């Protein structure tokens, strides 16, 4: 049996990139035509011109909080519950609608494997003809349906376990003998501990695909000690599958249906390869054509290709949240403001705002990387810019290029809260 879901996974990178960039202007045109929200957002954009990465990087980023704001505004005046982002309406082309915290409403279209999860499930070791115990929630959020439709596309049967009812989950596993589990790692751990308490052995449960939570090596080893090989996937309720782990366990390989960018938090500017930044994704989904959607998650691109033989780009996985908005002396300071300050000075190659001190005694220092910090009074000029942009006073520390950590943080809250 093949080690790959399909031939797309082993394409030459240049062939894949050409195919994605050929599809990009068509998706931009479709979004403008079929999505009222993108008709406004992209009103000054010529789709035919968006054929290279640099052109894509010039389009606005729509972040999750903006999506929520537009949905709320639209619903309040009797408009679309999706804020104008969906290209489909209720009816035959939208069999289900889901809700994520906010609430943000997400449509599910009719395409086979709509959320593109089959590829990730295959990489986790599942094969056609197997039974999968799916313990993602089937209520409100799309996670349960996301995994079920992917499993069906792969040719698997699904037991919709959902969440809760631990003893019943153990009983179902003991009697149905599934090949593996899909859900959060914490819930499978609870199930296995309950099984041990009940004296139930689950010898056929040997593989798992996890999502929704961190999956550290310590937990991976714990499952391995219990005879289960677990892999993780990275997906969101808005976008579906973004990336997945392989047997190589060296980062997460991108799904074939997305264009990924890593941008500096608070901006739409792509960072250099290997630098940590916010994950921004453009999908080729015609039902929900999200263009440059900011996930709010931090990650970084890894060099080279996966030892498994899959040739797509790899990312490190989830490295934290990109929204670092911080309240300082009663005022909110945003990552975008730090970027605005830095862009005023060509000498600055990187900036990081550090907030320190104790409660009610905030101290703000902008650390900037620059090869020329002393003679021209750069620090004093930057201090004036801080005051102008944030309306707060702050100090400036000039450091040599390469001194600041590569962790995606634009604002570091180092205050003591004890």
Image (cartoon, grey):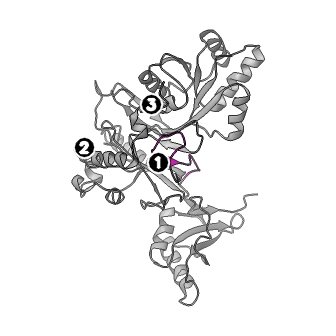
Element class at badge 3: loop
Element class at badge 2: helix
Q: Quadrant of the C terminus?
A: bottom right
Closer to us: mark 2 or mark 1? 1
Q: Quick check: 350 above or below 13? A: below
> Crowding at label 1, few (<14), some or many (≥20) Cα neighbours within 10 Å?
many
Closer to us: mark 2 or mark 3? 3
Relative image position of residue 85 (x, y in whole percent): 33, 42
The quadrant holding residue 414 is: bottom right
Relative image position of residue 323 (x, y in whole percent): 53, 54
Of callouts 2 and 1, the N-terminal one:
2
Residue ID for mark 3: 5
The quadrant holding residue 109 is: top left
Which span is picked out in magenta? 305-321
Q: Quick check: 217 above or below 65? A: above
Residue ID for mark 1: 313
Q: Quick check: 308 above or below 108? A: below
Q: Extreme top residue here?
A: 175
Q: Residue at x 53, y 24 (%)?
A: 126
Of callouts 2 and 3, the N-terminal one:
3
- Per the model, the C-alpha gap separating discs 3 and 1 is 16 Å
- Per the model, the C-alpha gap separating discs 2 and 3 is 28 Å
Nearer to me, 78 or 65: 65
Residue 239 visible in this rendered orientation of the protein: no
Tell whether 116 sits left or right of 364: left
Residue ID for mark 2: 30
Tell whether 314 sits left or right of 395: left
Q: Is residue 206 magenta?
A: no
Nearer to me, 202 or 28: 202
Q: Extreme bottom residue here?
A: 375
Q: Residue at x 41, y 23 (%)?
A: 153
Nearer to me, 243 or 147: 243
């Amino acid at each position: 049996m093949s080690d790959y879901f399909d031939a797309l996974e082993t394409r030459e990178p240049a062939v894949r990139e050409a195919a994605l960039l050929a599809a990009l202007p068509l998706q931009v045109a479709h979004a403008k035509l079929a999505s009222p929200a993108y008709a406004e957002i992209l009103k000054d954009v010529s789709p035919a011109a968006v054929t290279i990465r640099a052109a894509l990087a010039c389009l606005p980023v729509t972040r999750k909080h903006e999506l929520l704001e537009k949905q709320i505004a639209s619903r309040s005046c009797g408009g679309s519950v999706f804020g104008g982002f969906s290209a489909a309406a209720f009816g035959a082309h939208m069999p289900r609608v889901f809700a994520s915290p906010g609430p943000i409403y997400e449509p599910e279209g009719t395409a086979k494997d709509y959320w593109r999860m089959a590829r990730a499930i295959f990489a986790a070791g599942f094969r056609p003809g197997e039974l999968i115990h799916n313990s993602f929630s089937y209520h409100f959020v799309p996670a349960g349906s996301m995994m079920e439709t992917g499993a069906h596309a792969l040719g698997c049967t699904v037991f919709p376990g959902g969440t809760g009812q631990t003893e019943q989950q153990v009983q179902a596993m003991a009697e149905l003998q599934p090949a593996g589990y899909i859900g959060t790692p914490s819930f499978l751990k609870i199930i296995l501990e309950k099984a041990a308490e009940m004296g139930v052995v689950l010898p056929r449960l040997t593989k798992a695909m996890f999502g929704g939570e961190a999956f550290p090596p310590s937990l991976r080893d714990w499952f391995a000690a219990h005879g289960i090989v677990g892999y993780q996937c990275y997906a969101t309720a808005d976008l579906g599958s973004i990336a997945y782990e392989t047997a190589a366990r060296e980062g997460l390989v991108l799904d074939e249906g997305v264009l990924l960018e890593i941008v500096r938090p608070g901006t739409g500017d792509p960072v250099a390869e290997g630098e940590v930044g916010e994950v921004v994704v453009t999908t080729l989904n015609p039902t929900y054509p999200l263009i440059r959607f900011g996930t709010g998650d931090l990650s970084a691109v890894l060099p080279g290709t996966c030892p498994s033989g899959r040739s797509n780009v790899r990312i490190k996985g989830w490295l934290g949240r990109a929204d670092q908005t911080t309240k300082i002396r009663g005022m909110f300071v945003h990552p975008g403001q730090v970027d605005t300050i830095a862009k005023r000075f060509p000498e600055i190659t990187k900036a990081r705002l550090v907030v320190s001190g104790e409660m009610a005694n905030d101290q703000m220092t902008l650390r900037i990387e620059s090869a020329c910090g002393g003679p021209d009074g750069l620090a004093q000029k930057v201090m004036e810019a801080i005051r102008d942009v944030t309306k707060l006073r702050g100090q400036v520390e000039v450091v040599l290029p390469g001194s600041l950590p590569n962790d995606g943080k634009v604002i570091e809250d180092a205050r003591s809260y004890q």
